[in-house]
Amino acid sequence: MSDMRLIVAGAGGRMGRALVRAIADSKGAVLAGALEAPGSDLLGKDAGVLAGLPANGVKLSADLWAMSKEADGILDFTVPAATIANVAIAAERGIVHVVGTTGLSASDNAVIKSVTNRAVVVQSGNMSLGVNLLAAVVKRVAKALDESFDIEIVESHHRMKVDAPSGTALMLGQAAAAGRGIALDEAHSERGRDGITGARKPGAIGFASLRGGTVAGDHSVTFLGPFERLTLSHQAEDRMLFAHGALKAALWAHGKKPGHYSMADVLGLADI
């Protein structure tokens, strides 16, 4: 099979540049396009140069329809509005859409899932191997421990992150909720405690978000029971791990039948 031709959405951003570097370092994939927002000062710049590499001749453009004509997939770590705009074009072109965007609403996710009867979408709040293994373990532990163990999730990210809790924290919360056989909704989620909150609700899953510095992403899930605590954690040291995970997802999805997949599917963890 020839190399998979990939578009990087948000190619001028930090994650986009990491994705360009990951593709350059990989076997089996080539950069077919570099997408950037209309009006960006980076339009027309060379994607390789922006990523700290030699010039590759791929210029940043805002025209996804044109660049996707000769592409096999798109790696999308942008913002919700941009991702939703990209969904329709990717589905129309029949290319793989790897979605790592966080902060998506329920209606945004419904739009993404609406195209998966005719398109291949791989979506995850985190593309790293370690985090997805952590989620599988969290689900198992939550299932094994009863409600006498409270569940608290703490995440830390760099000062520029705009959404909270992080997509990864929510993914871990969903894993814990699945282990408990409940839905992660307002009835089972506690966030942003402040003031006189009253006692902790039995069975709730708590979230706390820290922001500052250049933290790539730290997450911990703590099970607090009578006289003992168990903490499971993951520390991301460089966003390149997310880029390589996204690339792995795209290569895995190439040629798959239409559907909505996750990194758990990519890594063979869906049944855990």
Image (cartoon, helix red, strand yellow):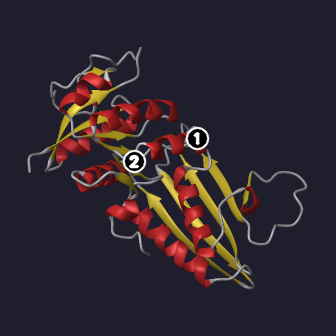
Q: Is residue 210 left or right of residue 114?
A: right
How many other residues sit within 10 Å of disc 1, few (<14), some (14-19) or many (≥20)? Answer: few
Give the SS element for disc 1. Answer: helix
Residue 10 visible here = no
How many other residues sit within 10 Å of disc 2, few (<14), some (14-19) or many (≥20)? Answer: some
Which residue is depicted at the point 40% across and 17% down?
38
Task: Give percent across and percent down for residue 69.
Answer: 21, 28
Task: Give percent across and percent down for residue 121.
Answer: 37, 48
- For the residues labelled 2 and 1, say whether their Cβ atoms are less than 8 Å apart: no
Task: Give percent across and percent down for residue 204.
Answer: 73, 66
- Select label 2 or label 1 by which is in front: 2
Taking depth in this image into account, of 234 and 9 the one nearest to the observer is 9
Q: Earlier in the sequence, mark 2 or mark 1?
A: 1
Taking depth in this image into account, of 106 and 231 the one nearest to the observer is 106
Which residue is depicted at the point 56% across and 50% down?
166
Task: Give percent across and percent down for residue 187.
Answer: 76, 60
Instruction: Say above or below: 200 vs 166.
Output: below
Instruction: Say above or below: 73 vs 41.
Output: below
Which residue is depicted at the point 43% across and 64% down?
132
Taking depth in this image into account, of 247 and 235 the one nearest to the observer is 247
**Residue located beneath label 2 in the image:** 116
Q: Quadrant of the C terminus?
A: bottom left
Q: Is residue 187 left or right of residue 92?
A: right
Residue 168 visible here = yes
**Residue located beneath label 1 in the image:** 107
Which residue is depicted at the point 53% across and 51% down?
167
